[in-house]
Image: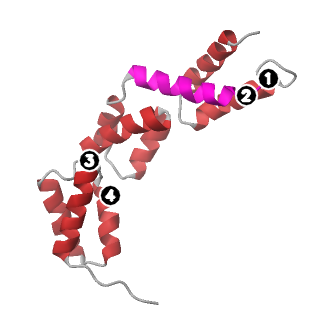
Amino acid sequence: MKSKKPISAEAARIRMADLCARSEQCEYDIRQKLFKTGLPASAREEIVDYLSANRFIDNYRFARSFARDKCRFSGWGKYKIRTALAAKRLTSDEISEGMAAIEDTDYMDALRRTALAKARSLDLFGEDARENRMKLYRHILSRGFEPSLASAMVKTIIKESAP
């Protein structure tokens, strides 16, 4: 088995700057990638400092982008987004700013899309109606939406699709 050719600090800095220029990255993700290069800790710190100073890395910007994208494109609720941001080791201020970036209309659209997609596969009025309605409710919760919103959405879908 061949061992990987070691990468220089300059090459790692250029590679990480290129990655950050192509997509939003948080400091934690960059640190993880740099750790895998095998560079010494001092070199990794210098690279992270350079990227932060030159605004390649901005955790606030990352949190806003991540939260909006996960809501719009993945249909995630606020609980799931908040947990994912915390897993990226962001501060509570950074997480709060990310959560504030989620537009209410986008959030409600994501909730509705998530609920309707699952509801299509369930019979909400047949013999197992109660069980299927609970499945729909649990599915919405599993996507990170608040229980009160999940309950209201289940009721809305039942009302709108009543035979």
- The answer to whether the residue labelled 2 contacts the one labelled 1, judged by CB atoms less than 8 Å apart, is yes
Where are the magenta residues, as a range?
104-123
Quarter of the figure with residue 61 = top left
Rounded to the nearest angstrom, the CA distance separating label 2 from label 1 is 6 Å
Q: Which mark is residue 134?
A: 2
How many numbered marks have been drawn onto this rendered protein structure? 4
- The percent coordinates of residue 48 (x first, y second) are 20, 62
Q: Which mark is residue 59?
A: 3
User: How busy is the neighbourhood of tag 4: few (under 14 within 10 Å), some, or many (20 plus)?
Assistant: some
Residue occupying image coordinates x 64% and y 34%: 139
- The percent coordinates of residue 14 (x first, y second) are 18, 66
Q: Earlier in the sequence, mark 4 or mark 2?
A: 4
User: How busy is the neighbourhood of tag 2: few (under 14 within 10 Å), some, or many (20 plus)?
Assistant: some
Please name the residue that numbered disc 1 is placed on.
130
Rounded to the nearest angstrom, the CA distance separating label 4 from label 2 is 38 Å
Q: Earlier in the sequence, mark 3 or mark 2?
A: 3
Residue 113, magenta (yes or no): yes
Please name the residue that numbered disc 4 is placed on.
28
Residue 135, magenta (yes or no): no
Q: Earlier in the sequence, mark 3 or mark 4?
A: 4
Q: Secondary structure at mark 2?
A: helix
User: How busy is the neighbourhood of tag 1: few (under 14 within 10 Å), some, or many (20 plus)?
Assistant: few
Going by the numbered disc 4, the residue's amino acid type is Tyr
Going by the numbered disc 1, the residue's amino acid type is Arg
- The answer to whether the residue labelled 4 contacts the one labelled 1, judged by CB atoms less than 8 Å apart, is no
Q: Earlier in the sequence, mark 4 or mark 1?
A: 4
The correct choice, above or below, for 33 with respect to 108 in the image is: below
Image quarter (top left, top right, bottom left or bottom right) of the C terminus:
top right
